[in-house]
Amino acid sequence: VQLQASGGGLVQTGGSLRLSCAASGRSFSRSFMGWFRQATGKEREFVAAVSWSGGSTYYADSVRGRFTASRDNAKNTMYLQMNSLKPEDTAVYYCAATKDYACSGYGCFSRYNYDYWGQGTQVTVSS
């Protein structure tokens, strides 16, 4: 089982990036999938989560209205569209997935509910 995050890079304040997370090895259509980020010297924090079908999405207050999470179960892939980026968004971004039906809704904000993790992709926003 593997999650592969990509799409990070260097962008100026106000710019946009789109992250992708390609899953392989099993279907995640019964798993919540989430994005987390970890800035240097800080704890890994929740960014966004997408429900099994993609019909519901959840966001941290710090990114709501700027970031949009989505998924395509046919492609076993999740996305994070990041707009209006700020320097404080600089971090390594990780994608993750839960085991089947391990959590739902706001219960999926905790990183401890996620058993599968990608390797991370660096996002740097310059001021």
Image (cartoon, rainbow, N blue to C red):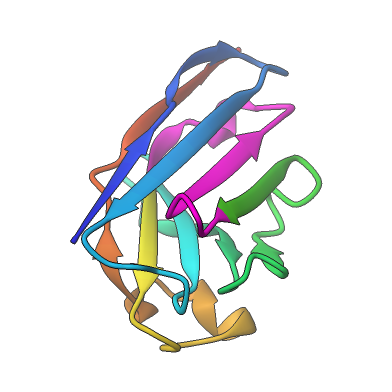
Q: Nearer the viewer, residue 12 or 121?
A: 121
From this view, report whether residue 27 is shown above or below residue 36.
below
- What quarter of the picture does the N terminus occupy? bottom left
From this view, report whether residue 95 is shown above or below residue 83.
below
In the rendered image, residue 8, in percent from the top left (x then y), is placed at 43, 26
> Is 88 a magenta residue?
yes
In the rendered image, residue 124, in percent from the top left (x then y), is placed at 46, 22
From this viewpoint, is residue 40 visible?
no
Q: From the viewer's perspective, is 114 left or right of 81?
A: left
Answer with the quarter of the image where residue 55 lies.
Answer: bottom right
In the rendered image, residue 38, in percent from the top left (x then y), is placed at 37, 47
For the point 69% across and 65% down, which residue is it? 57
- What quarter of the picture does the C terminus occupy? top right
Answer with the quarter of the image where residue 85 lies.
Answer: top right
For the point 48% across and 54% down, which residue is it? 35
For the point 62% across and 81% down, which residue is it? 106
> Is 92 a magenta residue?
yes
Residue at far right of view: 65
Specify start and end residues of the magenta stretch as a single range: 72-93
Q: Nearer the viewer, residue 29 or 91?
A: 29
Q: Nearer the viewer, residue 115 or 66?
A: 115
From this viewpoint, is residue 119 visible?
yes
Q: From the viewer's perspective, is 122 left or right of 60?
A: left
